[in-house]
Amino acid sequence: MTVVPDRERVVAPLEAFSTLPDWLAAAMDGERVAASLQHHAPVLRADHGVVLAWVTACRPERLRAKDGTWVARYRVTVRAGEAERDVVLVGELVPPPHQPTGPEVGDGAFVSDGDRHTHTDVDRDRHTDGDPDGAAGEWSCWLPDLRLRLRSEAGDPALPALPVLTHAPDTTRLLQLVLRRAGHPDAVIASCDPVVVRYKPGSRCTVVVGVTYADTVASAPPTTVVLKTHQGDKGQTAWAAMTALWARQEAWRGVVEMAEPLAFLPEERILVQGPVPEDLTLKELARRAFAGGDQDTLASLRVALAATGRGLAALHRSGAEYGRTATLADEVAEIREVVGRLSVTVPGLGGAAEPLLSRVEQLAGDPQPGPAVVPSHHDFRPAQVLLHEGSVGFIDFDGAAMAEPALDLGRFTAKLRDIGISSMAFTGQRLSGPVLRSHLALVDSLCEDFVGGYAAESGVSRERVLLWETCDLLTGLLHAWTKVRLARVGPRLTLLQHRVRALTDGAPSTG
């Protein structure tokens, strides 16, 4: 019988994730997509044939695995005369060996994207994916060299409330009713200034609204209000969690800031909440510390990480209760589902993650009765932590669930590690040798600052944190594939292999 070291048995198959096939990588190359559009549709009709337009640039926004195909979204810059504007194209990438047929360019016209959805997407690396597919416009084309079938997008059907959130008069009418019902009957809004700060097409949008009032208001209504809309029931989930937490303010006040829930409009899927003070996010501070290597910035990061750990412990001890529960078994099942979707079009990935997932299940043991559950954030990342004058605030409870404490800690440390390895990769340094080992050791110590801050206030199993962290690192690698983030594949694989050693070192060999 051949004895195979446990590390090799688990780590070696992960190499299958190291390189994306060209047909997939090409679809996220904006220059190649623009060149293909210029070749197959050199002159486009815009505004229903009144003006001729030419493609000048293309920015891939999203490419996602979905069933047996890949849904795509691009923002294309077109020139008509002296004017340029953006048009959103959506569609699908058809994987080999399928050979669809059809006309290269349809008879319709581009639908102008106007100013409706010219937003900045700054809320990336979330665990769940939005569906980027939009409503069909009239124009369509087939790019055979890239295997792309595209059409113009009209609006965002998954987020029907967007026009209300971004049009000041509509926003004013909505907030006027909400604030009066929320305990400010004397509030008369003079004006609103809605600004989109986060937008993921087909998934969610966050709008920060500056509010001015006609007269002095005795009830002191907020001068800043945050409006959110989500695809599906995430807004309802956030509302329920925030309401439960605010009913337990005495458990976390003075340790962490959280937004006051003001209203949830179920038919419109609009969540209304107060602000959380912010100078910068913990993610931004971490990037500065990793990129600059400045000792003062690094010291500030360590202080913020420890404070974040204490704030999370306060949230977990609050006694709030939510409607759903998340388990490690659910997490492993979800990862297997993602691998299954990928393997439909990239068969070589089918069994690549299975040895690691089996190892996680083995170490997790019998899920019954399982660790005690606490009110958890569920999608806890450095981007969800806001820093302001020494305080920390938590945002984005749309995935909230009851779960073991290790879920939030493992997800957080996984993302902190991802920020660290990405900062190294983006500098062009090689992901190997003494420099890599030194960098990983720094990230290890920073993760300990966070976990140590938590452990000083509340007990937690570090072994369970490692299991959740490993699952999240694997999910991050899978998302680099399903979202076709080429620059992240290598760093995330290196990071996952680094942490898998902690699972396998000292384990018995298997035959």
Image (cartoon, helix red, strand yellow):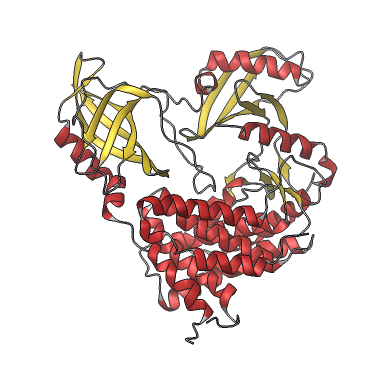
Relative to 236, say whether 294 is above or below: below
Q: How many marks?
A: 0
Q: Is 486 left or right of 380, judged from the image as shown?
A: left
- Which residue is nearer to you in this view: 186 or 149? 149
Residue positioned most to the right: 250
* Rendered residue at 66%/63% (across/down): 465
Regarding residue 98, the answer to whether it shows in the image is: yes
Query: Where 95 falls versus 274 (above or below)?
Result: below
With respect to residue 14, does 141 lie above or below?
above
In x, y percent, where is residue 309?
A: 70, 57
Among the 4 quarters of the image, the one containing residue 134: top left
Q: Residue 326: image x %, image y %?
A: 68, 49
- Residue 119 is situated, as x and y percent measured from the top left of the image, at 44, 32
Q: Nearer the viewer, residue 465 or 248?
A: 465
Residue 27 x/y as whole percent: 29, 45
Instruction: Name the residue nearer the viewer: 456 or 355.
Output: 355
The outermost residue toward the front is 1
Q: Is residue 304 visible?
A: no
Whether residue 58 is situated above or below residue 175 in the rendered picture = below
Q: Nearer the viewer, residue 249 or 376?
A: 376
